[in-house]
Image: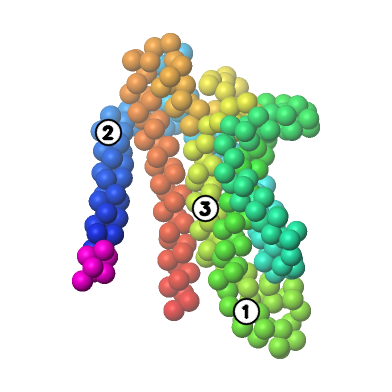
Amino acid sequence: MMKYVRSFLEWFILIVCTGTVLLFLGVIILDIIVKGWPAISWDFLSQKPTHAMTSGGIFPAIAGTVLLTIITAVFCIPFGVCCAVYLNEYAAENNLTRIIRASIRNLSGIPSIIYGLFGLALFVQGLNLGTSMISAGLTLGLLSLPYIVTTSEEALRRIPNSMREAALGVGATQFESIKDVVLPSALPGILTGVVLTLSRAAGETAPILFTGVAFFITGNSGEFNQEFMALPYHLYMLSTQHQAIEQVRPLAYGTALVLIVVVFLLSLSAFYIRYKYSKNDK
């Protein structure tokens, strides 16, 4: 009897905690939608800011966020997946490998502002890349790298060893078995982790704060070697640092809504990728 009571209490506490979190999340999102939707228009999405950021649109910030995410993906995905393949398929199970894995997981817990300071020291000053989109993208790539390695390795671990042994049994080399059997089977999990990591990176402010983001630029926002605008920093400035906060508050809510939609679409694509590949495997 006590076993059933304990099980019921555990489920009840879990449901209450989950419902409380979802309730507060729903209230916040609903508030942003209600206050941000009136600001959404084609002009808001396609034009540059004007009149000291009190009117106009956020197109440079949207373009900067998209380009920044692309740079981050180009840098972190190949390195992260290759590192995961090495750790799971080639590295021996010894103390060195365990230390490497522990270090990667510890890097995932470092505050993002530390990555921003490291990117400032390494990319902006050390490599003389200056405050630019490249510096910011590489910094976000370093931030995303531990997550890519961890999620990719977990996806590779889920592949049964029997599939590797079957490939080796028909004459394939280890590299061929990984390329033709293991990686295609682990691709749904890898892609899901990649997309979720990039959606998190797209909403980061601290890592790009010192490496290239600007509140307002007058030149071309698509050049990689110059400062750029991004939605997270633009929202931060409109909400806390603008000289007319009350006047630009509707624009801030509109920017927050656009950022949430961008992150939501990236997350939704991750679930779609997993669903599509899972359906194909059946």
SS class, disc 3:
helix
Q: Tell me the tag on residue 195.
A: 3
Residue range in magenta is 1-7
Using the numbered discs, state the Cα–Cα distance from disc 3 to disc 1 in whole angstroms.
26 Å
Q: Is residue 192 above or below residue 257?
A: below
SS class, disc 2:
helix
Relative to residue 192, is residue 117 drawn left or right? right
What color scheme is it?
A: rainbow
Look at discs 3 and 1 and give the one toward the viewer.
Answer: 1
Q: Earlier in the sequence, mark 1 or mark 2?
A: 2
Q: Amino acid at mark 2?
A: Asp
Q: Residue at x 43, y 60 (%)?
A: 272
Q: Earlier in the sequence, mark 3 or mark 1?
A: 1
Q: Is residue 48 above or below residue 202?
A: above
**Badge count:** 3
Q: Earlier in the sequence, mark 2 or mark 3?
A: 2
Say which residue label 1 marks: 161
In the figure, residue 181 lies in which quadrant? bottom right
Q: Amino acid at mark 1?
A: Asn
Q: Residue furthest bottom?
A: 170
Q: Residues within 10 Å of mark 3 (few under 14, many from 20)?
A: many
- Majority SS type along the magenta span: helix
Q: Position of residue 37 (x, y in %)?
A: 29, 33
Residue 116 in view, yes or no: yes
Q: Tell me the tag on residue 74.
A: none
Q: Nearer the viewer, residue 214 or 58?
A: 214
Using the numbered discs, state the Cα–Cα distance from disc 2 to disc 3 in whole angstroms.
27 Å
Say which residue label 2 marks: 31
Asked if residue 136 is among those painted magenta in the image, a careful observer would answer no
Look at discs 1 and 2 and give the one toward the viewer.
Answer: 1
Q: Position of residue 120 (x, y in %)?
A: 69, 29
Q: Nearer the viewer, residue 127 or 110?
A: 110
